Image (cartoon, helix red, strand yellow):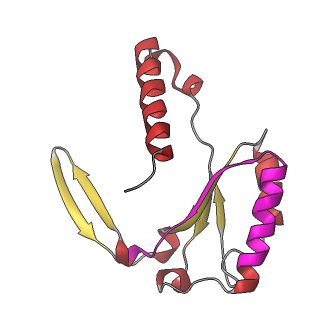
């Protein structure tokens, strides 16, 4: 997963200009042609979000905006690459995602095998069923 970190402009709701949208469009097309891109989305500012904090059985809702901009995500890609080195190389080719100071964070997504024996065949089956249901839902037209 490739995370585009938020900054003061993304948190203020400043949208990218036409040139950046064009450059990103071309870059995303390169990712697709290379068979790397699985998913991508931009995120609204944290002022439109909320957090749920867990403390044992207690749940506390915290409405945005959130103050630590460096801790926030403005958007993401989900890539399938052979190695961290390949992900880094693709990230280095990315147009500056905010046009100003920006940071991209790369994180590996867990695979079922990473969980070991604790991820039983029954749990694997449940995960496959849930993901299939989610995919059907994603493809269902919205009312």
Vertical comparison of 33 with 123: above or below? below
Residue at the spot x=16%, y=44% of the render? 57
In the rendered image, is residue 119 in sight? Answer: no
Q: Quadrant of the C terminus?
A: bottom left
Q: Is residue 66 magenta?
A: no
Residue at the spot x=67%, y=86% of the render? 17
Vertical comparison of 100 with 109: above or below? below
Dividing the picture into quarters, in which one does residue 110 lie? Answer: top right
Vertical comparison of 140 with 116: above or below? below
Q: Looking at the picture, how far across and down is residue 78, in whole percent? A: 63, 50
Residue at the spot x=27%, y=58% of the render? 52
Count up the numbered dots: 0
Residue at the spot x=48%, y=68% of the render? 71
What range is drawn magenta here?
Answer: 21-46
Dividing the picture into quarters, in which one does residue 53 lie? Answer: bottom left
Q: Nearer the viewer, residue 90 or 48?
A: 48
Q: Residue furthest left?
A: 58
Q: Nearer the viewer, residue 141 or 60?
A: 141
Residue 69 vs residue 59: left or right? right
Q: Looking at the picture, how far across and down is residue 35, in whole percent? A: 79, 45
Residue 34 vs residue 28: left or right? right
Residue 90 vs residue 72: left or right? right
Q: Looking at the picture, how far across and down is residue 61, in whole percent? A: 22, 63
Q: Looking at the picture, how far across and down is residue 104, in whole percent? A: 66, 65
In the rendered image, is residue 56 in sight? Answer: yes
Q: Is residue 32 magenta?
A: yes
């Amino acid at each position: 997963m490739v995370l585009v970190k938020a900054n003061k402009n993304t948190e203020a709701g400043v949208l990218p200009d036409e040139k950046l949208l064009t450059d990103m469009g071309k870059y995303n097309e390169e990712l697709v042609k290379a068979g790397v891109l699985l998913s991508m989305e931009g995120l609204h500012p944290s002022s439109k979000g909320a957090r749920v904090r867990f403390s044992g059985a207690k749940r506390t809702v915290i409405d945005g905006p959130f103050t630590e901009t460096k801790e926030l995500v403005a958007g993401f890609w989900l890539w399938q690459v052979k190695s961290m080195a390949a992900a880094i190389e693709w990230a280095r080719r990315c147009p500056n995602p905010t046009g100003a100071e920006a940071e991209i964070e790369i994180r590996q997504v867990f695979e079922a095998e990473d969980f070991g024996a604790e991820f039983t065949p029954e749990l694997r089956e449940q995960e496959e069923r849930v993901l299939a249901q989610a995919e059907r839902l994603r493809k269902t037209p919205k009312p």
